Structures are given as structure tokens and as C-alpha cells.
Amino acid sequence: MGLLRRTALMFAAGAAAAAVVRGRRPPVLYDLRGRTVLVTGGSRGHGLVLARGLVREGARVAICGRDVETLERARVELERLGGEVLAVPCDVTAPAQVDDLVRIVHDWFGPLDVIVNNAGTIAVGAERATTIEDYEEALRINFWGAVHVIRAALPDLRRRPGSRIVNITSIGGLVAVPHLLPYTASKFALVGYSRGLRAELAADGVVVTTVCPGLMRTGSPPNAYFKGRPRAEYAWFSVGDSLPGLTVSAETACARILDACRLGRAEVAFPFWVRLAAAGQAVAPELTALALTTMHRLLPAYHGAPTHERLRGWDAQSMVSPSWLTTLGDRATLRNNQTAATR
């Protein structure tokens, strides 16, 4: 009898949920035209692609980055697209600089409507090569950088009904990827923070969207860091970051993210294999762990001590990369302001 009762309750709950879904009205799209949007890390790579998309939507776009030369090239390009653009040098790990950034944007364009936390760093290497400083750096930029920006922007956002926070995380925030442990730890932290923040800010009319993309062809590998066996690590990472099917173009990712922002989605993960991997982690953790263990065995082995030495992608090239295997990624590097001049 207990089983029948539980089954009946499950069916009743399912029917109620279906009725709610059927009764929902079509979502009201958030119009980005005329909105003031801040994109952190907007001077190159994925941030620049997002800034281009926002300019085409008619938004007033502020971008920030640490390298003044790269930032200026991005500003010039975005203005040529017809955008109202403000470029501000800023290190998001420094709260005082973030406070100044938000104040400057407010004074220039008016109150913020949308912030896109995109600034980030990535270091690739085996756990044996990793130091505590690697974890601290990843958390400082990928997690605390977003927290600093959100806390500085919230007074504006709370005064703007329907305002948006878009946090760019990663598949690395859903599934722990070998040879990316500091990055993964920081992205797991950001996913948890972002999900909880959505629940807490709903009463203030602020909508938080968590974005969990897989590999995107943004051209970023040359500006990433590689440890242990840097040339071997750069080879697999840059080749994987270029393969069609496994990766999506930065432009496709941008369209998905802006749609999620307009719709006020709680979370968006893409491409399909990211959702599959996340589901596998949830329902079959042992099988997922076995798959990740196998992946680790295929990656470059390192048997030395933890090291502070690391190479940037530009300095870790080999016969494998760049090559025809990395053609799509190399094109994205040139297209998205990730050239050697940004070193």
C-alpha cells in the first residue's frame, strides 16, 4: 500500500508540474538595446566576441582588461562596428580598481544594467606540477574577480528592474577535468556562488544566469599557461581546443549566451556533450570517475616536484601545435585579438 501511495503522489506531482508548464506564459525577452553592459576580460578572446555581439544588439558596452595595448585595439574595433564603447584598464582581483571601474562606467554611461563576468585565467598541467600559488591565482581571478565586480555593481543593479548578471563558468565547474585542477576548483566555486546568488537576488529583481560552456574556439591557448611538460601539455590542449564537433565557435557560444541573458535562464550548458557529461556525473559518478581516470592516463605524465616554472602558450609551441590540427584555433587567435603582441 505504501508503494502505491508513493507512486500516486509521484504521478500527482508530475501532473501538477506539467500543468504549471502548460500554463506558463511565453517569457518576456530582456531587450539589450540601450542597456549599459560591462564585460570583464572584454579586450580579447571570448570577452571580445561577447562585446561585439552586444554592440550589434545596440547596447552601450564597457570593457575592461589588464593590458592597455590590447584594450585599446579592442576599443577601436568595437567603435568601428558603430558601438558606444568605454574601455577601462582594470585588474578584477583588486577591489579598489573594481570600485573605480564601476564608478567610471556609471559616470560615463549611467547605471549598469548588465554585467558579464568573463575575466579568467587557465593553467594546464599535472597535479604533481601544481603549487598552492596556482590554486590561489585561479581563485583570485576566476572566482574572487567575479565576486568583486558583482558586489561593486549591485547598488546599480538593484535599482534597475530586470537587471542581469551573467557568470561565465565552464564544464570545469560541473565535471573535474584532469590537468586543470586549479581552474576546476575556481570554476566549481563560481558555479556554486552563481546558483546561490540567483536565489538570493530574485527578490531584488536581479536575474543571475550561470553559463557552463565546453571548449570554445576563442583563440585562447597561446595566452594560457602550461606546467610540468609544457610543450606536451600545450599540444593536447591546443589541438583539443580546435577540433570541430568537440568545440563550438566563439560566435555560436556568444549567441547562446546572449539568448540566455534575454530569457533570464538560470543556467545554460553547451554543446550537448557538456550536458551529457554533467548528467553522467550526477547519475553515474563511478563511471564518470573511470572515464576521467582513463583521460588522465592519456595525458602527458609528469614525475617531478611541484614547480613555479611555467610557459605561456606562445612559448610552448612544437611541431604539433601550431599545425593543420590547430587551424581553427589559430584563426580564432588572430580574429579575437589574441596575437603575440598581447604578451
Image: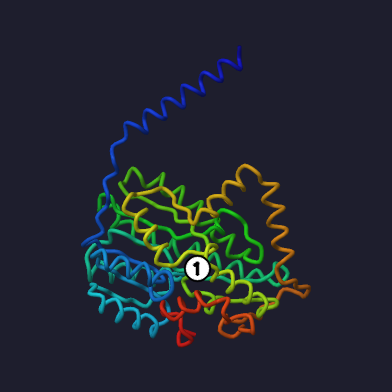
**At 55% across and 61% down in the image, what residue appears?**
186
Q: Is residue 238 above or below residue 8?
A: below
Quadrant in the rendering for residue 236: bottom right
Q: Is residue 264 left or right of residue 111?
A: right
Q: Is residue 182 above or below residue 222?
A: above
Q: Percent from the top left, x then y, of residue 242? A: 54, 71
Q: Position of residue 118 (x, y in %)?
A: 43, 65
Q: Of all residues shown, which one is farthest toward the right?
A: 303
Q: Quadrant of the N terminus?
A: top right
Label 1, secondary structure: give it.
helix
Q: Residue at x 50, y 62 (%)?
A: 143
Residue at the outermost top position: 1
Q: Name the residue nearer the viewer: 210 or 253.
A: 253
Q: Position of residue 323 (x, y in %)?
A: 58, 81
Q: Up-down: is 26 above or below 81?
A: above
Q: Which residue is mark 1?
A: 141
Question: Height in image: 319 above or below 228?
Answer: below
Q: Residues within 10 Å of mark 1 (few under 14, many from 20)?
A: many
Camera-side residue: 32 or 297?
Answer: 297
Number of numbered discs overlaid on the protein picture: 1
Q: In the rendered view, how is the structure colored?
A: rainbow
**Picture quadrant where residue 147 is located:** bottom left
Where residue 134 appears, as percent x and y from the top left, is 61, 70
Q: Amino acid at mark 1?
A: Ile
For image coordinates 60% across by 80% down, the residue present is: 321
Question: On the image, which quarter does residue 303 sit in?
Answer: bottom right
